[in-house]
Image (spheres, grey):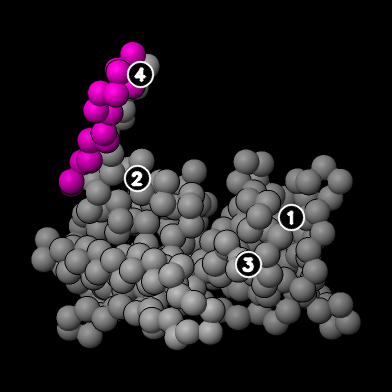
Amino acid sequence: MQTIRGRVAAVKWAYYTAAAVEGYTVTHDKVAGWTVAGALVPGAVDAFKLAQRPLYFVAPFKRGAWRWEIRTFTRGADGGRFVASLGPVSVEGEHGITRPSP
Amino acid sequence: MGSRVRRPEVDVLPLTDGDTITVKRYLTAGEFRALIKMSTKPLHVDAGRAANGQDLSFEVDPTESGIGVVLAYLLDWTFTDFDGRPLVIRDQPTAVVRAALEAIDADSYMEVQRAIQAHDSTMRAYIAAEKKTIPGATAPVPT
């Protein structure tokens, strides 16, 4: 099983940030495929954009970002934690993302 | 009745020297409000003056309205630094995009601003025409 852990990521709808993510774990399993669990940043969640499709989970690294299409997205009862099943990963070069401005 | 929400789409606008900028096709109401807020100075409404029908028009800041429309639309560009590395603005906070816009040379900035203002005018005209278009008629093609 592969695991990627990170702090800053985002759930994107087109060029918009639907939700900012603070702390996530992406895992890849031959049977289950890619999945992610993480925490949404309170006050940085746009309910309208989060209800749109397709959504993408985008996790930046130093000179680029990993991007997955979100297949299923489930928020926990408190609304802060989420889990999502993901499609195949693609890599963006030279265009990282950072925490969106308020 | 049509949808009042538009899908977020982008347009790539050509600049000189083979560069391009990627912009939002439309602004949402929230983005439009942010643009107006950035472009105007605070207005303190005096209820007495308003009741007397006195002028309460907005005061537009021309320096901020220019960069305001750029920040509202601009998503990405092909600009690079002296070493050929991309000047990354995509998905960056507004402060980072603004800093990059202020770091490029003045001619390049004005080229970006003119291109985006022209795009804004085109899209406003398109939206206005769309509202007047009879169903089934051909609408103008956006840039």
Q: Amino acid at mark 3?
A: Met
Real-space Cα distance between discs 3 and 4? 37 Å
For the residues labelled 3 and 1, the Cα–Cα distance comes to: 39 Å
Place residue B60 in its image quadrant: top left
Q: Earlier in the sequence, mark 3 or mark 2?
A: 3
Q: For the residues marked 2 and 1, what is the alpha-carbon distance in whole angstroms?
A: 36 Å
Quick check: B64 left or right of B1?
Answer: left
Q: Secondary structure at mark 4?
A: helix
Q: Are marks 4 and 1 on the same chain?
A: no
**Res A7 visible:** no
**Mark 3 crowdedness (10 Å alpha carbons): few <14, some 14-19, many ≥20:** few
In contact (CB < 8 Å): disc 2 and disc 1: no
Rounded to the nearest whole Å, what is the CA distance between mark 4 and mark 1?
Answer: 53 Å
Q: Which residue is mark 1?
A: A38
Q: Which mark is residue B1?
A: 3
Task: Specify few, some or many for label 2: CA neighbours under 10 Å numbering under 14, 14-19, or 20 or more.
Answer: some
Residues in magenta? B48-63
Task: Examine the rendered structure and indicate whether residue A80 appears above or below residue B52.
Answer: below
Q: Position of residue A66 (x, y in %)?
A: 59, 72
Secondary structure at badge 1 equals strand
